[in-house]
Image (cartoon, helix red, strand yellow):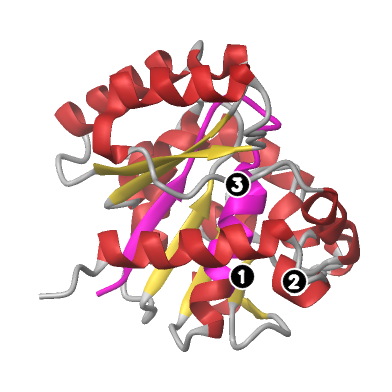
Amino acid sequence: MAHIIAVANQKGGVGKTTTAINIAAYLSKQGKKVLLVDLDPQGNTSSGLGIDKSALTHTLYDVLSGSITAVNAILSTAYYGLDILPASNVLAAAEIELSTRQKREFILKSALRGLEYDYIFIDCPPSLGLLTINGLVAANMLLIPAQAEYYALEGLGQLINTVKRVRAALNPQLKLLGVVVTMYDGRTSLSGAVMDELHKHFGELVFDTTVPRNIRLAEAPSHGKPIFAYDRFCRGAFAYKKLTKEVARRVEPVK
């Protein structure tokens, strides 16, 4: 049975897609069978792995609409057998169309049922709409990337309240895997202050590994590559490799 991890934060620009892509890619590089689900109509996860969205025959939209099964929309990537369920801007229509369906919050969960992977990562859109709710209902764990800046803490309360409501009404198995601080700059007092606040609210759920501001991380998606395939010696690559090990230890603790 797959470990299904939703990567979510309703605030955009926090490194959510970069985190989903690179943890999934490093796990795949380590021999795990991994699927990335692009639940964001912007399709950045898809393009970030070199998928030409304009050439797609089938996307997650077709899966959610019920016209095909997930197996028929999944694509292989060039990275150690990492697979992706891609998206394009057509997915935006699903938010409206799903609202009229029965059990609308469970449609993604049903679509992913039976897929044989070690890990499934769901890159949620930067909102708390019906697509994100579907991601939280389908997952058994939530990973929250939070940018090391003043406004990072502002929206987290809203996200946590949404998670509590999802747990209470739709998915009692959902647990918070952790909060990872992105775009961290240890030279600034602001980054340290944000870390202190996050530790105050989330304690040990804050990952030890922080992801630094790194130009190579910012460049890699435009080349359609995870960071280890673009520049495996940069600071961003070392951070995501370390973070992936930390994620794996939390998901599959050594007995």
Mark positioned earlier in the residue sequence (3 or 2): 3
Sequence-wise first label, 2 or 1? 1
Q: Is residue 162 left or right of residue 187?
A: left
Where 202 falls versus 75 (above or below)? above
Q: CA distance from mark 1 to mark 3?
A: 23 Å
In space, the residues marked 3 and 2 are separated at their CA atoms by 14 Å
Decide if residue 69 is in sight here: no
Which region of the structure is painted magenta? 1-25
Which one is in front, 252 or 124? 252
Residue for point 51% across, 20% down:
194
Label 3: which residue? 211
Q: Is residue 80 visible?
A: yes
> What element does badge 2 sit on?
loop
Q: Secondary structure at mark 1?
A: strand
Q: Is residue 40 above or below residue 228?
A: above
Mark 3–mark 2 CB contact (< 8 Å): no
Q: Which residue is mark 2?
A: 233
